[in-house]
């Protein structure tokens, strides 16, 4: 009998990938070399130039956090793993590792719709893979049998919410990229509404 990787090891590996992604994203923030003879006003102006970079980092941090919570919400209700589940999990985590790359592109090349779209597509693929994991687990009866219908509906809706939001944001970016970034934050109130309507 072939031995399968235990589910808790799969989740632990995922946690390590999330931690790596956030850490790598943080250390990629470049502080410019500033001359020593800057006045207070000049220093303030140079620091304000970094504001956009910080906004991108802050939003990206919370997006990774949202995916980490969703990851545990999905895998926390799966009772066992098998080969297909492990490979789907690896595909999801691959796109999580690409987030720091997408952030670097955005910081280096600014608010161009094409650059934003690359970032959003990474997040769409990540969210879609997590949804595939959930639907695969449901279809193959890998989820906790004590889950109520309301709880299953809750997780199902939340798993498809994020890819939809990121897809819509690509259309918004054709008008204004910065607005498209902030549109991502609508995920938070949407999740709150789902949690209130479909209780565990």
Image: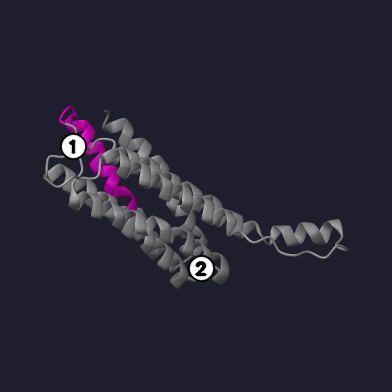
Instruction: Name the residue at the front extreme.
Output: 1
Residue 164 at least partly seen: no
**Which residue is tagged 2?**
105
Q: How many marks?
A: 2
Task: Specify whether 31 is left or right of 162.
Answer: right
Q: How is the image coloured?
A: one colour
**Residue at 44% over, 49% down:** 63
The residue segment tinted magenta is 145-163
Q: Position of residue 38 (x, y in %)?
A: 85, 62
Q: Dividing the picture into quarters, in which one does residue 79 lie? A: top left
User: In the depicted view, which residue is nearer to us: 130 or 112?
Assistant: 130
Q: Position of residue 85 (x, y in %)?
A: 21, 49
**Residue at 32% over, 33% down:** 195
- Screen quadrant of the N terminus: top left
Element type at mark 2: helix
Element type at mark 1: loop
Q: Can residue 85 be found in the magenta stretch? A: no
Q: Position of residue 192 (x, y in %)?
A: 37, 36
User: In the depicted view, which residue is nearer to us: 192 or 4?
Assistant: 4
Q: Position of residue 44 (x, y in %)?
A: 77, 56
Residue 97 at least partly seen: yes
Cα–Cα span, label 1 and label 2: 38 Å
- Screen quadrant of the C terminus: top left
Q: Can residue 159 be found in the magenta stretch? A: yes
**Residue at 38% over, 62% down:** 122
> What secondary structure predominates along the stretch shown in magenta?
helix
How packed mark 1 is, by other alpha carbons closer than 10 Å (few <14, some 14-19, many 20 or more), is many
**Residue at 40% over, 59% down:** 169
Q: In the displayed structure, would residue 144 be above or below residue 47?
A: above
The reply to whether dot 1 and dot 2 touch (C-beta < 8 Å) is no
Residue 157's tag is none
**Which residue is tagged 1?**
143
């Amino acid at each position: 009998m072939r031995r399968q990787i235990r589910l808790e090891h799969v989740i632990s590996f995922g946690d390590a990938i999330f931690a790596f992604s956030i850490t790598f994203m943080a250390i990629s923030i470049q502080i410019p070399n500033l001359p020593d003879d800057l006045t207070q006003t000049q220093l303030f102006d140079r620091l304000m130039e970094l504001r956009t970079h910080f906004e991108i980092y802050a939003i990206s941090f919370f997006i990774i956090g949202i995916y980490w919570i969703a990851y545990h919400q999905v895998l926390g209700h799966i009772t066992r793993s098998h080969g297909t589940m492990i490979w789907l999990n690896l595909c999801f985590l691959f796109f999580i590792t690409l987030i720091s790359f997408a952030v670097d592109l955005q910081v280096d090349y600014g608010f161009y719709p094409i650059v934003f779209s690359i970032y959003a597509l990474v997040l769409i693929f990540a969210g879609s893979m997590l949804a595939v994991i959930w639907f695969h687990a449901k279809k193959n009866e890998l989820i906790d049998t004590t889950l109520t219908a309301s709880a299953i509906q809750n997780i199902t809706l939340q798993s498809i919410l994020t890819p939809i939001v990121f897809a819509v944001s690509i259309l918004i970016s054709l008008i204004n990229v910065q607005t498209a970034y902030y549109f991502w934050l609508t995920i938070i109130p949407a999740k709150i509404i789902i949690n209130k309507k479909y209780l565990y």
